[in-house]
Amino acid sequence: MSEKKVAPAPGDRTVIGLTFGNSNSSIAHTVDDKAEVIANEDGDRQIPTILSYVEGEEYYGQQAKAFLVRNPKNTVAYFRDFLGKDFKSIDPTHNHASAHPQEADDSVSFTVKDKEGEDAEPSTLPVSEVSARYLRRLVASASDYLGKKVTSAVITIPTNFSEKQKAALIAAAGEADLEVLQLISEPVAAVLAYDARPEGVISDKIVVVADLGGTRSDVSVVASRGGMYTILATVHDYEFAGFALDKILIDHFAKEFLKKHGGADPRENARSLAKLKQESESTKKALSLGNNASFSVESLSEGVDFASTINRLRYETIARSVFEGFNRLVESVIKKADLDVLDVDEVILSGGTSHTPRIAANMGSIFPKTTTILAPSTTPSAINPSELQARGAALQASLIQEYEADDIDQSTHAAVTTVPHVNNAIGVVSLSESGEEVFVPIIQPETAVPARRTVHVPAPKNGGDILVKVVEGNTHIKVTKPEPKANGDSKAAKVEDADDSDEDSDFSDEEEEEEEKREKVWKIGTTLAEAAIRGVKKGGKVEVTINVNADLSVVVTTREVGAKGGVRGTISA
Amino acid sequence: MATTVVALPLPSLPEGWSAEKDFKAVGKITQDRATQRTIEPIGPHFLAHARRARHKRTFSEDDRIQAQERAKNVEEDNDSDISEPEDAMMLQRDAKDWKNQDHYKVLGLSRYRYKATEEQIKRAHRKKVLKHHPDKKAAAGRVDDDTFFKCIQKATEVLLDPVTRRQFDSVDEEADVEPPTKKQLAKGNFYKLWGSVFKAEGRFSKNHPVPAFGDDKSSKEDVENFYNFWYNFDSWRTFEYLDEDVPDDNENRDQKRHTERKNANARKKKKAEDNARLRKLLDDCSAGDERIKRFRQEANAAKNKKRLEKEAAEKKAAEEAKAKKEAEEKAAKEAEEKAKLDREAGKKAKEAAKNAVKKNKRVLRGSVKDANYFVSGDASVATIDAVLGDVELVQTKVDPDEIAALAAKLNGLKLADEIKSVWQEEVKRLVAAGKVKESEIKALN
């Protein structure tokens, strides 16, 4: 502490991206603009957020997790969410198998024996100190890996972190000699990780980010507009998360154990329960990869060993209620954002729990076929969901590492980040094949202004003079009921039915027949402006650029592609 | 963002449509429906947005400025570092004399020297080659003019190999900074002048980072750190570059060995000289360093202060102890004297009491005798004995005060009846108090 803490100069920074989670944390850095997640000295890329003290020795990560069985009293786990909160508002459910949180002043603390010796006094560590110690270990691992002292980081946080929690996290990082360049929200970090891939294309899209973690699930709707991200809605859930799946496996195997061996319920004994939990977690992970997984615990209860296996189908059956909980979460957030599943272009599954194939499959059935589900089991090119946020943070860190801290502050100030978003789409009117007027969106709804978009629209086949009509537009969901007993349709329905019955066996035929066809349809709204392009060549194209200024005035520039001049006009706000 | 291409065609212009400059603003954007939301400050596109917002640029302005900046960068990369005028003398150098040539200057890198990166050396080489290649010279009519080209090749060869580059850097005097003279120092600038000397010397350090010399505001810790580092300087400087050429022929082995030995000795000697030079440099510098003097004074002041404080404290403690001892002695003496007086007074009082008791007893005995043993005429021996026995008994049963009281009552009484009644009263009182049993009393009841 004698060292004076001076923020490193932008040129001397070594930056990393950090995800500091309740259950796991990870570290990422960038190599040639590509993010890479760093393995710590144990070879883990997902480092359990756990500290354990044995004989004055500090363990963290996977090693500390192992001590949950043998040394739960001196092991601190699941403490991230306690940062910057008072004792009244924390949920200590997950800590009953480790060091218990206690009230201390206006924060939370843990009492652990962190010094050597039989009769050493246990010390009371406030959660900020625990976090600082843990972060210090993470930074040390990253520094070892990179061969340079890590000075600064971008850290991801949930969207519902309060100012006090943010301040506490920054203070804890400062204690660990780590400069926090920026705190970024977890869902957007995940989106950035995908968008920053070399093959990633920046487009206007609505993304649902389902961050399914160990102790909590956060689902958000993010509008990605030309690489700018706006969060439209979020839901947070502390019931449907990874631990709920563990619980189901724990119950399943505990019952099986009782059936086989009788005796005491292993769930009644703290040590047996810890063993059950640990093995259930690894079984769960194995089930995400393979169709079968084994479960074996030595000396589970009263010295009796227990081994069993479970297949994925059985697991998915017993865990169905939890999986449906995830579905409801996703549906509720879309509703909260005032959108329809048809509006969603992409679903990103992030967080450890989203490795589960069933969850991705369920998302596939909620959303239409056009929606991309980015999860390992549905999209082969998907990024490992556990690494998304750390990668996003690392990318952001590499982007801003050259800036002065002051500069970053100013750029992230509300005066810069809070801007009006257009609520209606702006586009031009085109003709469909049947000659009807249709709306072609150029600027999507929920785009932050100022915004500029350009499109190329073909001219009519024969060229000539052309009308460019700039209009507002919005969507509505068109529902078409299938014609009853039409031959072609029922056939199609049957095929679909066969598909579905694989996934959902209790789907009845009656329901299937009533299924409606839902489409997203653009409706032409008020006309904003009209412009004429004269003498377009045969087969030519017209370029339309729409520029919405910060004061919501619109500049329309339109010309024939390849020609000079063109028409430019302003629609005042 | 990239331009999107739409498939559906635009409609034709309806007949009779006309507008000024072919543009007609009809409606307005529905403003009340624009929501204020917060963009997440993440990603490259946000940075662009923040740049535009903070500098109040429009899209096209920002595009232009960014393009300009990028273009400038490229230009800088190409030109700035390797554009030194070429000295005519240098161009005529003989490549055989490569040991004496300044490789950095040949490549046009004399501004960078040991700081030049490998990338810079490569680029400089390429640039020089493009200019000085013999083929180019031949095209200009000077056939076989490859002397400077050879110099370039040699310079690149030396500088691109890290080992030989270090050897050259070790003896590259151009990069040295001469220690400041007294005259220079007299003008001030002590920290700046010495700072640049040590910065240049620091290039030989095996350990990095090399601590900075600092200025007069540097902390004591920093200054000590600096001098410790330099007095324990670990240098990679070698002097192989100055070796005499070792004869290459196999015939004269002895000559070869002799030269090798001579070279090794020369290197060792030069290294020792270099170390001595550095040490002297440091001594000179530290001798003139005001900071060290200041720190020493401060330390002395602190130490003296401590010592004085300690002495004062000791003196005070001694005085206190002495005063306390004296007070104790005095108190003890007084107590002793007082005890002695008390003792004597007690003795006198006791004797007086004893005498009083004796006197009173005499009065008691006298009273019965005065009363003629309570009989008329001569009292028989038995009667006298019984009465005196009773008197004795009563005397033993009562304490001196009661004896005194009884004596006072009896004193002056001459009549036998009165005396007897006093005695009877006394006996009654004693019997009532349970001190004497009635049966024990023989005559006085």
Image (tube, coloured by chain):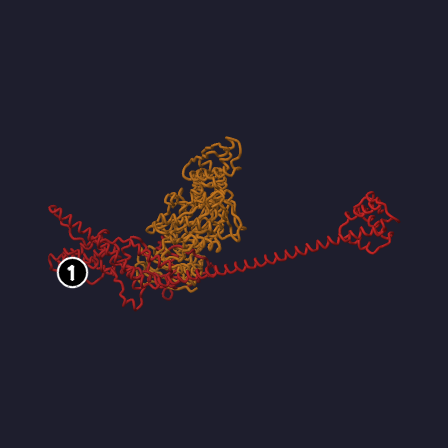
Judged left or right of residue A70, residue B354 is right
Q: Secondary structure at mark 1?
A: helix
* Residue B280 seen in the current view: yes
Q: Residue furthest front?
A: B378
User: Which one is nearer the viewer's eye here, A52 or B231?
Assistant: B231
- Of all chains in the rendering, the one displayed in orange is A
**Residue B148 placement: quadrant:** bottom left
**Residue A7 percent location from the top left of the image:** 39, 57
Question: Image quadrant for the N terminus of chain B?
Answer: bottom left
Q: Is residue B186 above or below residue A518?
A: below
Count of numbered tags: 1
List the residue tagged with mark 1. B91
**Residue A259 percent location from the top left of the image:** 51, 31
Q: Is residue A71 above or below residue B25?
A: above
Q: Chain of mark 1?
A: B
Local packing at callout 1 (Cα closer than 10 Å; few below 14, some 14-19, many 20+) is some
In the figure, the shade used to draw chain B is red
